[in-house]
Amino acid sequence: MDFSFSPDQQLLKNSARAFLDEHMKPAAVRLLWDDPRGDSDTLWKEMAQLGWLGLSLPEAYGGSALGMVEAAILLDELGRAACPGPYWPTVLAATAIERAGSDAQKKRWLSAVATGDARATIALLDADLDWNPEAMTTRAEKSGSGFTLSGTKQFVPWAHVANVLLVPAKTTDGLTLFLVDPAAAGLTLEPAPVMDLATRLTIVKLDRVAVPADGVLGGPGQAGPLLAELLRRGAVGAAAEMLGAARRCLDMAVEYAKVREQFGQPIGSFQAIRHKCADMLLEVENSHSAVYYAAWALDAKAEDAALAASVAKAYVGDAARKVCGEAIQIHGGIGFTWEYDLHLYFKRAKALEPLYGDGDYHRELIVRAVAG
Amino acid sequence: MDLNYSPEDIEFRDKTRRWLEANVPTQELATLEERKAWHRKLYEAGYVGTLWPREFGGWGASPMQQAIVQDEMARVSAPPPINGLGIGFIGPTIIVHGTDWQKQRYLKKMLTAEEIWCQLYSEPNAGSDLASLRTRAEDQGDHFLVNGQKIWTSSGPISDWGILLARTDPKVAKHKGIACFLLNMRQPGVDVRPLRQITGSSLFSEVFMTNARAEKRDLIGGLTQGWEIAQTTLGWERGANSLGRVTRYAIAFTQLVRAAKELKRGGRPLFDDPVVRAKLGRIYADLEVQRYAGLRVLSALLKSDSPGAASSITKLSYTEFEKRYYELALEILGHRGQLISAREEFEEVDTSSGEPGTWATAFLWSRAGTIYSGSSEIQKNIIGERVLGLPKEVRADRLKA
């Protein structure tokens, strides 16, 4: 029983922290906030060189074949930096291709992801706001040797920069995943004007979009278990990012409470503030336990892995919202300004809260898993 | 990271489970003698004093094995051993700070529950501000004369000995003039009066000391070291119950689900109500996180990383969780949650300390955790100052000192 990071894992964490502290200072985050595309080619290439993009991919495709714990360590740091970009959607999509793809599909995409030459995303949320894949109304009709897809996918992260979209749709065989070219005829991308500009979301409309036969990922009707797994991994990854954002907010609040003086004393000496900080630390530490337990359980294929993923997402979503919100409260007026950096992390955590299943969805999964 | 149990721990768990299944009492233990007999049986099998060094009569096992024992006992609702405070922290205090004579005289009898121990720390006017305690111990040459009142003393009426904090020097700063003694409870100057708690039972007492006698050989450490000793030994027991506690919560959760399936509103089981399901999901997520956090503490203990002030986070976390838990449970159960004797099997629930009862008693007991052993507010002060490094507050007693 060892809950601490191995030396290699600690090294990954330290190097990610050092890199992001240097290259993803709040000013750099803000530049990307102001950028119409919202992500940086230079940064993407650097992430590829650092081995981050291929972290979970097989060595044959230029990856390092590491697990969810390592991915969570990285996402924790990316969340801490509120780093904008399609990192996690791309890695998740690559995981799907790695799990279910044909040799040709893997050859086409995996090395390109690892080298930073391709971005990808998964359209998990359908027309209505239900994370249960069975509820989707997007259809794929047989058409010649391929399919035509029609429907709406909502709030797809980073679809506007992706080279390939993973789109689940219902065929007569059931849930099926498709690799869709974002430039295909009949596909429109409509950016959603959201408050966190580090998490760009897009509405993807599909109007009889043609997908050739080799665009089916895995067999028709076979996507259910894979989608469930992607949702689990996505949830744990999002929880790790929220954890990082929350820890950043806690650190900022504690530093501020040490130096900000009112009534002739640092406000951190007042119990009203100190107890808030203690509560925040409690939530951050519990979130750490939840995230890394779940990440380990996925890697170890533990029997409670699915449960732990839902627990992490449900718990950390609430915890991060609380912690980031209290950080604003501790800062007072300055925390409410655009100039002060706190809102970068506050909004980042908030944007991740509904992604890959919100708290309500995961709490329902928990009840089904443990009580029926 | 590797959260698998080691093969030795798995084997130890299997062995413990088999032993408990064969030996756990089938009838409620009615008398103190029966409880002592059960305690001795547990001790002889290696399930009490698990963590204590072998040279003092313990079993020299790891914190993980100790936690496994507690966990397995919770799983079968085994009656807890007695002398929990003695074995959990008074004995370790003697081991760390006591004299050889004290170790010889007291430790073995504590382990075997031949002598029961209690803690004499809190006073009516010294709760969170424990260092302001007023019980005096005056040096009479060959012994100390003790006068004062203690409160919230668990196991008071059955105790043979107590660990006492008393003021030896009223002239120095309050943290400095305190000594730590071992006090014979079976003497005329000690009067124990049980207090009835909000659960209706009497686990606590008041203890009045009137010209009571503490022997010179029963002083632990120096005359002014009491506060320091009390501070350094509170950490021994952390993590021991981390798994067992969560198992009790999980058993209660199973009961709650049973209740929600049995009880109906508007002709359908409460369990089918999305609002109830959302509450159950929230409880279970929270409960699992307590388990993960417990494993993390155990992992640190196994590496001999002393949790130090961080153990305040653990205590704050589970005690606050426990209140949220039973509040939500009683919201779901309505009047059925407030029954003080069970009519249906799903109404039977142990408290987190392992005492059998109903949802009502578990709910009422949940109010204790955030008060005993340093209230939540005190834990938050410790976390703020010692973990986060926030500045000390300006306090009237510090200005004077």
Image (tube, coloured by chain):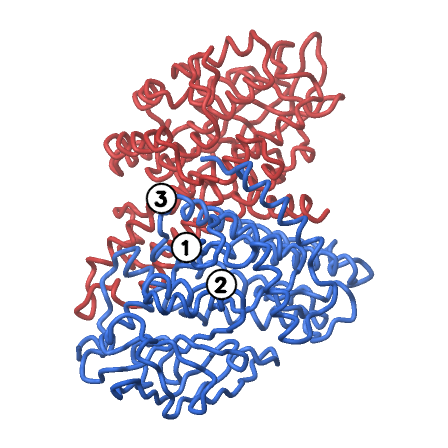
Chain colours: A red, B blue
Q: Are marks 3 and 1 on the same chain?
A: yes
State whether residue A150 is above or below residue A289. above
Q: Is residue A317 visible?
A: no
Circles 1, 2 touching at the beta carbon (< 8 Å): yes
State whether residue B376 is above or below residue A155. below
Q: Nearer the viewer, residue B278 or B349?
A: B349
Q: Amino acid at mark 2?
A: Glu
Tag on residue A282? Answer: 1
Residue at (74%, 61%) from the top-left corner?
B259
Q: Earlier in the sequence, mark 3 or mark 1?
A: 1
- Describe the element under mark 1 as helix, strand or loop: helix
Residue picked out by circle 2: B320
Which subunit holds the residue at mark 2? Answer: B
Total numbered labels placed on residues in the image:
3
Mark-to-mark CA distance, 1 and 2: 11 Å
Residue picked out by circle 3: A345
Instruction: Residue A179: give x, y in percent of width and height.
Output: 57, 17
Q: Amino acid at mark 1?
A: Leu
Q: Amino acid at mark 3?
A: Tyr
Q: Are marks 2 and 3 on the same chain?
A: no
- Describe the element under mark 2 as helix, strand or loop: helix
